[in-house]
Amino acid sequence: MILVDVGNTRAAFFDGKKVWYVKERDFLNFVPKVRCFYINVNPRLSEFLASNELFVDISPRVLKALNSSYKGLGSDRAAVCLAVKEREKTLVVDAGSAITLDFVSGGEHKGGCIIPGFMAQLAAFANISTKLACDYNENISLANLPLCTQDALSYGAVAPVVALVEKLACELCGEGGFMRAGKFNGDKSVEVVLTGGNGKILSKFIKGSVFDELLIFKGMQVAL
């Protein structure tokens, strides 16, 4: 059995032992030999997935398994939330093409928000001016203000996300409600779990956070 998370730019595969990734354009050449249970948020690949009976869509099962009042919740967000549903007060940050932040407490998805991913932000800057067309610097530091454009753009992409995570971690106290809890200090009152392509990068800036590459697959396994 293989689990497949089909995203907007790539598909992630998990066979129970290892994870590997296939870019969207190459995914169309993938021929499954065993059943592949998948969730999909990429409408461009829906027809291809539906054309082969070895691809099994478990999105409905994932969405049904999660207790949530959120309208229009994506199966990818539902899966990462399912993975932590047995924990108390967990903020899940999935940093991919878009960055989603979802709060799970008492086995229930309480809500969340969506912001542009790092690459989307940098692409937007490149559309403003060719002088702003820079690659992301994975070694950016938030300790000092940048002194070059590449670092300035990278800083501007990372710092607001870190600030939002810390803000929510401070405020998400109490069952299903908001309450000021002082400055975030990385304690376990609200656990912060990161996943996704840029989750590991973010985790080094958020004290007390945990990075889990397999989080979405753990949630899919819960649904199965």
Image: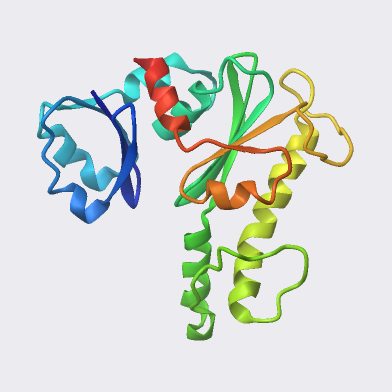
Residue 194 versus residue 97: which sits nearer the camera? 194
> Is residue 163 rendered to the left or right of residue 136?
right
Farthest bottom residue in view: 131
> Is residue 95 rendered to the left or right of residue 152?
left
Farthest right residue in view: 182
Q: Answer with the quarter of the image where residue 18 lies.
A: top left
Q: How is the image coloured?
A: rainbow
Q: Is residue 18 above or below residue 84?
A: below
Q: Residue at x 60, y 67 (%)?
A: 154
Q: Quadrant of the N terminus?
A: top left
> Is residue 125 rendered to the left or right of residue 61?
right
Q: Is residue 118 above or below residue 64?
A: below
Residue 101 x, y percent position in the rendering: 59, 39
Q: How many marks?
A: 0
Farthest front residue in view: 17
Residue 72 in sight here: no
Q: Residue at x 35, y 17 (%)?
A: 61
Residue 211 in sight here: yes
Residue 183 x, y percent position in the rendering: 87, 41
> Is residue 223 rendered to the left or right of residue 207?
left
Residue 158 x, y percent position in the rendering: 63, 58
Q: Quadrant of the C terminus?
A: top left
Q: Residue at x 82, y 40 (%)?
A: 184
Residue 197 x, y percent position in the rendering: 46, 49
Residue 15 versus residue 185: which sits nearer the camera? 15
